[in-house]
Amino acid sequence: MNLRRWMKLFGTTILIGALIAAITGIGLMGTDQEFQVKGTENWLVNIGLMALGGLTFGAFSHMGFFAYLMLNYIARSIFKRLYTWIMIQGLLAIIVMFEIGYWTYDTNFPSYTFWAVPLLLLGAALLVAWRKAHETSSGAWIPTVFFLVAITALESVPAFRTGSMASLVFQIIPLFVCNAYQIMRLHRILDRSPQAAAQATSAS
């Protein structure tokens, strides 16, 4: 990946974060009249601030993406057998799902949050992983699910601490979409040929 491609990926990611955050925020404002940013009642200012927050989410997502790539590179050099690292990722994804339930159980979140959030996150991750595997190889399933479940959850920790469902939705949706975009772009950025894409998938 050269500097031009990296800058393009970064720029597109933060713009997607801003767009999705604004759309999510508008949806939340339509269902929750008390959902505001900085306490202002001007809806246009609220949307602008939400978009700015989305830029931050996009940048945070981009940092998490490259942190995962670095972790993946180190892990592949440690484990001699690739499937060992893949199985570890699958196990960690399961653990994180239980952690989400633990973070939200018996808190200010609605009672259904502890099972609904991890299941929805897993379902969305599986959908993206299916598309990733379709475009590359079957080896992309577990790494993609791990990235979208575990990394998205870790990036959303501040929202889990608020106890506010609206805040959680406002943060986790843009982060997930940004992460999904980046993982789907990875094999295209590294090489557009199907053979090289399949090889790149094992690293994602």
Image (spheres, rainbow, N blue to C red):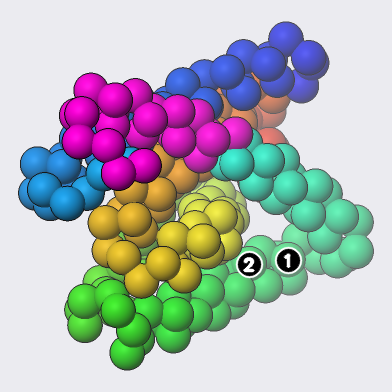
Residue drawn at point x = 86 percent, y = 66 percent: 79
Residue drawn at point x = 30 percent, y = 44 percent: 39
Q: In the picture provided, is 137 more to the left or to the right than 7? A: left
x and y percent of residue 119 in the render? 31, 69
Residue most toward the top? Answer: 4
Q: Which image quarter is the C terminus in? A: top right
Give 95 or 188, whichever is nearer the viewer. 95
Q: Is residue 45 magenta?
A: yes
Residue most toward the front? Answer: 40
Do callouts 1 and 2 mark residues in contact (Cβ within 8 Å)? yes
Give, as a three-letter code, the residue at label 2.
Gln
Indicate whether 137 appears above or below 196: below
Residue drawn at point x = 44 percent, y = 85 percent: 102
Secondary structure under tag 2 reads: helix
On residue 85, the disc is: 1
Magenta stretch, residue numbers: 38-59
Q: Residues within 10 Å of mark 2 (few under 14, many from 20)?
A: many
x and y percent of residue 157 in the render? 52, 64
Disc 1 to disc 2, C-alpha distance: 6 Å
- Picture quadrant of residue 66: top right
The answer to whether one can see residue 133 in this image is yes
- Picture quadrant of residue 125: bottom left
x and y percent of residue 190 in the render? 69, 24
